[in-house]
Amino acid sequence: MRDSMEVEMLQIHADALQSSNAAYHEFLLHYKPNECFVYGFVEGKEDPMFYRGLIENHLPEEWELILIRTGNRDNVFATFQNMDWIRFPPKRVCFFVDRDLSEFLEEESCSGSNLYVTDNYSIENDIVTVGTLKRVLEEVLGITELNAIETGKIEEIFEHNDNIFREAMAPVMAQILLWRRARKKVSLDNIQLKELFAFVNAKIVLKKEWSSPNARVQHIATRLNDTASPPHELAASEAEFRKKQGLKRYIRGKYLLWFFVQCALEIHKAIPTICEKYKSPPKHRVGLGVGNSMPIIAPRIRHPISLENFIIRNYVEYIKGVRTASCN
Protein backbone atom coordinates (compact mmCIF):
# COMPACT_ATOMS: atom_id res chain seq x y z
CA MET A 1 0.00 0.00 0.00
CA ARG A 2 1.12 3.53 -0.68
CA ASP A 3 2.04 5.55 2.38
CA SER A 4 0.22 8.79 3.17
CA MET A 5 3.09 11.02 1.99
CA GLU A 6 3.14 9.37 -1.46
CA VAL A 7 -0.64 9.68 -1.75
CA GLU A 8 -0.43 13.36 -0.78
CA MET A 9 2.24 14.04 -3.39
CA LEU A 10 0.21 12.31 -6.09
CA GLN A 11 -2.80 14.40 -5.16
CA ILE A 12 -0.74 17.61 -5.26
CA HIS A 13 0.52 16.84 -8.76
CA ALA A 14 -2.99 15.91 -9.91
CA ASP A 15 -4.27 19.24 -8.58
CA ALA A 16 -1.45 21.07 -10.37
CA LEU A 17 -2.49 19.58 -13.70
CA GLN A 18 -6.07 20.73 -13.15
CA SER A 19 -5.25 24.23 -11.88
CA SER A 20 -6.01 27.19 -14.17
CA ASN A 21 -4.13 29.57 -11.85
CA ALA A 22 -0.55 29.59 -13.16
CA ALA A 23 1.00 30.73 -9.87
CA TYR A 24 -0.91 28.14 -7.84
CA HIS A 25 0.01 25.49 -10.41
CA GLU A 26 3.69 26.40 -10.00
CA PHE A 27 3.36 26.29 -6.22
CA LEU A 28 1.86 22.81 -6.30
CA LEU A 29 4.70 21.56 -8.47
CA HIS A 30 7.26 23.00 -6.03
CA TYR A 31 5.52 22.04 -2.81
CA LYS A 32 7.27 19.38 -0.72
CA PRO A 33 5.31 18.67 2.49
CA ASN A 34 8.10 17.14 4.54
CA GLU A 35 11.19 18.98 3.33
CA CYS A 36 12.89 22.19 4.46
CA PHE A 37 11.12 24.74 2.25
CA VAL A 38 8.99 27.81 2.89
CA TYR A 39 7.00 29.51 0.15
CA GLY A 40 5.93 33.00 -0.85
CA PHE A 41 3.83 34.65 -3.55
CA VAL A 42 4.80 38.11 -4.86
CA GLU A 43 3.60 40.42 -7.62
CA GLY A 44 6.29 41.25 -10.18
CA LYS A 45 9.67 40.17 -11.45
CA GLU A 46 11.64 42.58 -9.23
CA ASP A 47 9.86 41.79 -5.97
CA PRO A 48 12.04 38.75 -5.11
CA MET A 49 15.10 41.03 -5.18
CA PHE A 50 13.56 43.08 -2.38
CA TYR A 51 12.14 40.29 -0.22
CA ARG A 52 14.54 37.37 -0.65
CA GLY A 53 17.56 38.74 1.20
CA LEU A 54 15.72 39.70 4.38
CA ILE A 55 13.71 36.47 4.48
CA GLU A 56 16.69 34.20 3.91
CA ASN A 57 18.67 36.02 6.62
CA HIS A 58 16.06 34.72 9.09
CA LEU A 59 16.05 31.11 7.87
CA PRO A 60 18.27 28.36 9.27
CA GLU A 61 21.00 27.23 6.90
CA GLU A 62 19.22 24.05 5.78
CA TRP A 63 15.98 25.84 4.91
CA GLU A 64 15.21 27.29 1.47
CA LEU A 65 12.78 29.93 0.24
CA ILE A 66 10.77 29.58 -2.96
CA LEU A 67 9.19 32.82 -4.20
CA ILE A 68 6.58 32.62 -6.95
CA ARG A 69 5.75 35.62 -9.13
CA THR A 70 2.05 35.94 -9.87
CA GLY A 71 2.19 38.90 -12.29
CA ASN A 72 0.17 41.47 -10.34
CA ARG A 73 -1.57 42.35 -7.10
CA ASP A 74 -4.94 40.88 -8.05
CA ASN A 75 -3.33 37.53 -8.82
CA VAL A 76 -1.69 37.45 -5.39
CA PHE A 77 -5.08 38.04 -3.76
CA ALA A 78 -6.78 35.44 -5.97
CA THR A 79 -4.20 32.81 -5.03
CA PHE A 80 -4.47 33.73 -1.35
CA GLN A 81 -8.26 33.39 -1.40
CA ASN A 82 -8.19 30.03 -3.18
CA MET A 83 -5.56 28.41 -0.96
CA ASP A 84 -6.62 25.38 1.08
CA TRP A 85 -5.44 26.38 4.56
CA ILE A 86 -6.35 23.02 6.05
CA ARG A 87 -3.90 21.38 3.71
CA PHE A 88 -1.12 23.98 3.65
CA PRO A 89 0.22 25.57 6.89
CA PRO A 90 -0.44 29.35 6.67
CA LYS A 91 2.81 30.29 8.41
CA ARG A 92 4.72 28.30 5.78
CA VAL A 93 3.04 29.94 2.76
CA CYS A 94 3.05 33.75 2.75
CA PHE A 95 1.85 36.47 0.40
CA PHE A 96 3.40 39.88 -0.32
CA VAL A 97 1.59 42.78 -2.02
CA ASP A 98 1.98 46.52 -2.51
CA ARG A 99 -0.46 48.78 -0.69
CA ASP A 100 -0.91 50.86 -3.84
CA LEU A 101 -3.69 53.47 -3.48
CA SER A 102 -5.97 51.13 -1.53
CA GLU A 103 -6.31 53.70 1.29
CA PHE A 104 -8.19 55.94 -1.14
CA LEU A 105 -10.19 53.40 -3.11
CA GLU A 106 -13.29 51.42 -2.24
CA GLU A 107 -11.95 48.03 -3.20
CA GLU A 108 -12.49 44.60 -1.76
CA SER A 109 -9.50 43.80 0.37
CA CYS A 110 -7.97 40.67 1.80
CA SER A 111 -6.43 40.27 5.20
CA GLY A 112 -4.64 37.49 6.95
CA SER A 113 -1.78 36.84 9.34
CA ASN A 114 0.30 35.49 6.43
CA LEU A 115 -0.50 38.35 4.01
CA TYR A 116 2.00 41.23 4.06
CA VAL A 117 0.94 44.62 2.68
CA THR A 118 3.67 47.25 2.30
CA ASP A 119 3.58 50.21 4.68
CA ASN A 120 3.57 52.65 1.76
CA TYR A 121 2.55 52.59 -1.90
CA SER A 122 5.05 49.87 -2.82
CA ILE A 123 8.37 48.29 -1.95
CA GLU A 124 10.20 50.97 -3.97
CA ASN A 125 9.09 53.63 -1.48
CA ASP A 126 11.38 52.13 1.17
CA ILE A 127 14.40 52.70 -1.08
CA VAL A 128 14.19 56.50 -1.12
CA THR A 129 16.10 57.47 2.01
CA VAL A 130 19.28 59.43 2.58
CA GLY A 131 20.84 56.36 4.18
CA THR A 132 20.33 54.28 1.05
CA LEU A 133 21.64 57.17 -1.05
CA LYS A 134 24.90 57.35 0.90
CA ARG A 135 25.46 53.61 0.51
CA VAL A 136 24.80 53.75 -3.24
CA LEU A 137 27.16 56.71 -3.67
CA GLU A 138 29.93 54.89 -1.84
CA GLU A 139 29.45 51.24 -2.81
CA VAL A 140 28.14 51.66 -6.37
CA LEU A 141 29.29 55.06 -7.61
CA GLY A 142 32.71 55.11 -5.94
CA ILE A 143 32.35 58.26 -3.82
CA THR A 144 34.22 57.47 -0.61
CA GLU A 145 35.80 59.04 2.46
CA LEU A 146 33.72 62.18 2.60
CA ASN A 147 34.09 64.36 5.67
CA ALA A 148 31.18 65.51 7.80
CA ILE A 149 30.75 68.81 5.93
CA GLU A 150 30.69 67.09 2.51
CA THR A 151 28.26 64.46 3.77
CA GLY A 152 26.08 67.26 5.12
CA LYS A 153 26.02 68.95 1.71
CA ILE A 154 24.87 65.73 0.05
CA GLU A 155 22.16 65.24 2.67
CA GLU A 156 20.93 68.80 2.08
CA ILE A 157 20.83 68.28 -1.69
CA PHE A 158 18.90 65.04 -1.32
CA GLU A 159 16.38 66.49 1.13
CA HIS A 160 15.87 69.52 -1.13
CA ASN A 161 15.38 67.32 -4.19
CA ASP A 162 13.08 64.91 -2.37
CA ASN A 163 10.82 67.74 -1.23
CA ILE A 164 10.69 69.38 -4.68
CA PHE A 165 9.92 66.08 -6.39
CA ARG A 166 7.16 65.02 -4.02
CA GLU A 167 5.48 68.43 -4.12
CA ALA A 168 5.60 68.44 -7.92
CA MET A 169 4.08 64.95 -8.07
CA ALA A 170 1.15 65.72 -5.75
CA PRO A 171 -1.21 66.98 -8.51
CA VAL A 172 -0.11 64.12 -10.77
CA MET A 173 -0.98 61.56 -8.10
CA ALA A 174 -4.27 63.39 -7.49
CA GLN A 175 -5.15 62.91 -11.16
CA ILE A 176 -4.08 59.26 -11.08
CA LEU A 177 -6.33 58.75 -8.06
CA LEU A 178 -9.31 60.18 -9.95
CA TRP A 179 -8.61 57.92 -12.94
CA ARG A 180 -8.39 54.92 -10.63
CA ARG A 181 -11.69 55.79 -8.99
CA ALA A 182 -13.27 56.06 -12.43
CA ARG A 183 -11.77 52.62 -13.23
CA LYS A 184 -9.99 54.01 -16.27
CA LYS A 185 -7.34 51.76 -17.79
CA VAL A 186 -4.34 54.05 -18.13
CA SER A 187 -0.75 52.80 -18.40
CA LEU A 188 1.06 54.67 -15.65
CA ASP A 189 4.41 53.44 -16.95
CA ASN A 190 3.92 55.73 -19.97
CA ILE A 191 4.48 58.82 -17.85
CA GLN A 192 8.01 59.96 -18.72
CA LEU A 193 9.34 61.92 -15.75
CA LYS A 194 12.42 63.03 -17.66
CA GLU A 195 10.06 65.21 -19.70
CA LEU A 196 8.99 67.07 -16.55
CA PHE A 197 12.22 67.40 -14.58
CA ALA A 198 15.85 68.40 -15.09
CA PHE A 199 18.88 68.66 -12.79
CA VAL A 200 21.17 71.65 -12.42
CA ASN A 201 24.32 71.09 -10.35
CA ALA A 202 22.67 68.03 -8.79
CA LYS A 203 19.52 69.93 -7.81
CA ILE A 204 16.21 68.96 -9.36
CA VAL A 205 14.07 71.57 -11.10
CA LEU A 206 10.79 71.49 -12.95
CA LYS A 207 11.13 72.42 -16.58
CA LYS A 208 9.57 75.84 -17.19
CA GLU A 209 6.75 74.60 -19.38
CA TRP A 210 5.57 72.26 -16.60
CA SER A 211 5.99 74.58 -13.59
CA SER A 212 2.22 74.98 -13.35
CA PRO A 213 0.40 72.02 -11.71
CA ASN A 214 -2.34 72.26 -14.35
CA ALA A 215 0.25 72.10 -17.13
CA ARG A 216 1.78 68.95 -15.61
CA VAL A 217 -1.58 67.24 -15.31
CA GLN A 218 -2.59 68.21 -18.85
CA HIS A 219 0.73 66.89 -20.12
CA ILE A 220 0.41 63.48 -18.49
CA ALA A 221 -3.22 63.22 -19.60
CA THR A 222 -2.12 63.81 -23.18
CA ARG A 223 0.70 61.30 -22.72
CA LEU A 224 -1.82 58.68 -21.61
CA ASN A 225 -4.38 59.52 -24.28
CA ASP A 226 -6.91 60.65 -21.71
CA THR A 227 -8.40 63.88 -20.41
CA ALA A 228 -7.60 65.76 -17.23
CA SER A 229 -10.28 66.08 -14.57
CA PRO A 230 -11.96 69.45 -13.90
CA PRO A 231 -9.91 71.80 -11.66
CA HIS A 232 -12.30 71.57 -8.69
CA GLU A 233 -12.15 67.75 -8.72
CA LEU A 234 -8.36 67.84 -8.94
CA ALA A 235 -8.15 70.29 -6.05
CA ALA A 236 -10.36 68.10 -3.85
CA SER A 237 -8.41 64.98 -4.78
CA GLU A 238 -5.07 66.61 -4.02
CA ALA A 239 -6.35 67.90 -0.67
CA GLU A 240 -7.41 64.38 0.27
CA PHE A 241 -4.11 62.96 -0.96
CA ARG A 242 -2.14 65.37 1.20
CA LYS A 243 -4.38 64.86 4.24
CA LYS A 244 -3.74 61.10 4.20
CA GLN A 245 0.06 61.53 4.15
CA GLY A 246 0.16 61.07 0.39
CA LEU A 247 3.38 63.03 -0.09
CA LYS A 248 5.22 60.83 2.37
CA ARG A 249 3.57 57.46 1.69
CA TYR A 250 1.64 57.27 -1.57
CA ILE A 251 3.72 58.67 -4.41
CA ARG A 252 3.93 55.80 -6.89
CA GLY A 253 7.01 53.74 -6.06
CA LYS A 254 8.31 53.46 -9.62
CA TYR A 255 8.32 57.26 -9.90
CA LEU A 256 10.25 57.56 -6.65
CA LEU A 257 12.74 54.95 -7.85
CA TRP A 258 13.33 56.98 -11.03
CA PHE A 259 13.89 60.08 -8.89
CA PHE A 260 16.28 58.27 -6.55
CA VAL A 261 18.47 56.87 -9.34
CA GLN A 262 18.64 60.19 -11.19
CA CYS A 263 19.42 62.04 -7.97
CA ALA A 264 22.30 59.66 -7.19
CA LEU A 265 23.71 59.92 -10.71
CA GLU A 266 23.48 63.71 -10.71
CA ILE A 267 25.21 64.00 -7.33
CA HIS A 268 27.94 61.73 -8.71
CA LYS A 269 28.29 63.98 -11.73
CA ALA A 270 28.49 67.11 -9.56
CA ILE A 271 30.78 65.68 -6.88
CA PRO A 272 33.76 67.93 -7.83
CA THR A 273 31.66 70.93 -6.71
CA ILE A 274 30.84 69.21 -3.41
CA CYS A 275 34.14 67.59 -2.52
CA GLU A 276 37.50 69.26 -3.32
CA LYS A 277 39.47 66.03 -3.57
CA TYR A 278 37.47 65.00 -6.66
CA LYS A 279 38.65 66.79 -9.80
CA SER A 280 36.27 64.63 -11.84
CA PRO A 281 33.57 62.09 -10.95
CA PRO A 282 35.03 58.69 -9.99
CA LYS A 283 34.35 55.64 -12.12
CA HIS A 284 31.22 53.68 -11.29
CA ARG A 285 31.99 50.42 -9.53
CA VAL A 286 28.80 49.06 -11.06
CA GLY A 287 26.83 50.53 -13.94
CA LEU A 288 23.64 52.06 -12.51
CA GLY A 289 20.47 53.00 -14.35
CA VAL A 290 16.73 52.82 -13.79
CA GLY A 291 16.55 49.51 -15.67
CA ASN A 292 18.96 47.64 -13.40
CA SER A 293 18.45 49.64 -10.20
CA MET A 294 16.48 47.16 -8.12
CA PRO A 295 19.04 44.32 -8.00
CA ILE A 296 21.77 46.87 -7.22
CA ILE A 297 19.92 48.96 -4.65
CA ALA A 298 17.70 46.39 -2.89
CA PRO A 299 20.56 44.76 -0.91
CA ARG A 300 21.55 48.20 0.39
CA ILE A 301 18.28 49.33 1.93
CA ARG A 302 17.08 49.14 5.50
CA HIS A 303 13.98 46.96 5.43
CA PRO A 304 10.86 48.11 7.31
CA ILE A 305 10.31 46.75 10.80
CA SER A 306 6.82 45.62 9.80
CA LEU A 307 8.30 43.22 7.24
CA GLU A 308 10.86 41.81 9.66
CA ASN A 309 8.17 41.19 12.28
CA PHE A 310 5.97 39.53 9.65
CA ILE A 311 8.77 37.13 8.69
CA ILE A 312 9.39 36.22 12.34
CA ARG A 313 5.67 35.66 13.07
CA ASN A 314 5.30 33.36 10.09
CA TYR A 315 8.35 31.61 8.63
CA VAL A 316 10.48 31.65 11.78
CA GLU A 317 7.65 30.43 14.03
CA TYR A 318 6.70 27.73 11.52
CA ILE A 319 10.26 26.38 11.44
CA LYS A 320 10.48 26.45 15.24
CA GLY A 321 7.25 24.46 15.40
CA VAL A 322 8.53 21.87 12.94
CA ARG A 323 11.78 21.47 14.89
CA THR A 324 9.92 21.13 18.18
CA ALA A 325 7.57 18.50 16.74
CA SER A 326 10.48 16.48 15.34
CA CYS A 327 12.11 16.38 18.78
CA ASN A 328 9.01 14.97 20.50
Image (spheres, rainbow, N blue to C red):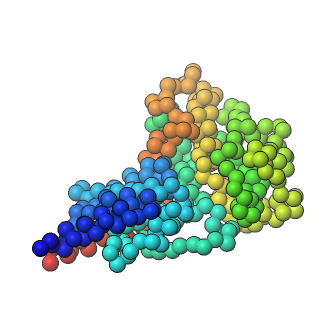
Q: Is residue 266 above or below residue 300?
A: above
Give the percent coordinates (x, y) of residue 303.
46, 56
Q: Name the residue located 45 percent from the left edge and 55 percent from the top edge.
A: 69
Q: Name the residue located 60 percent from the left edge and 28 percent from the top edge.
A: 269
Give the percent coordinates (x, y) of residue 238.
78, 61
Q: In this view, does 33 lie above or below 191?
A: below
**Left or right: residue 313 compared with residue 13:** right
- Which sits in the foreground, 212 or 226? 226
Give the percent coordinates (x, y) of residue 136.
50, 40
- Which sits in the foreground, 143 or 315? 315
**Left or right: residue 291 compared with residue 83:** right
Q: Name the residue located 76 percent from the left edge and 56 percent from the top edge.
A: 175
Please identify the quarter of the rendering in which residue 250 is found.
bottom right
Q: Which residue lies furthest to the left in this view?
A: 1
On the rendered image, what quadrant is the N terminus found in?
A: bottom left
On the rendered image, what quadrant is the C terminus found in?
A: bottom left
Q: In this view, does 92 lie above or below 23?
A: below
Q: In this view, does 198 lie above or below 36?
A: above
Inspect this view and state whether residue 328 appears. Answer: yes
Q: Name the residue located 70 percent from the left edge and 53 percent from the top edge.
A: 186
Q: Which residue lies furthest to the top in this view?
A: 279
Inspect this view and state whether residue 160 appears. Answer: no
**Left or right: residue 179 compared with residue 9:** right
- Which sits in the foreground, 317 or 25? 25
Give the percent coordinates (x, y) of residue 211.
82, 43
Total labels drawn = 0
- Which sits in the foreground, 71 or 19? 19
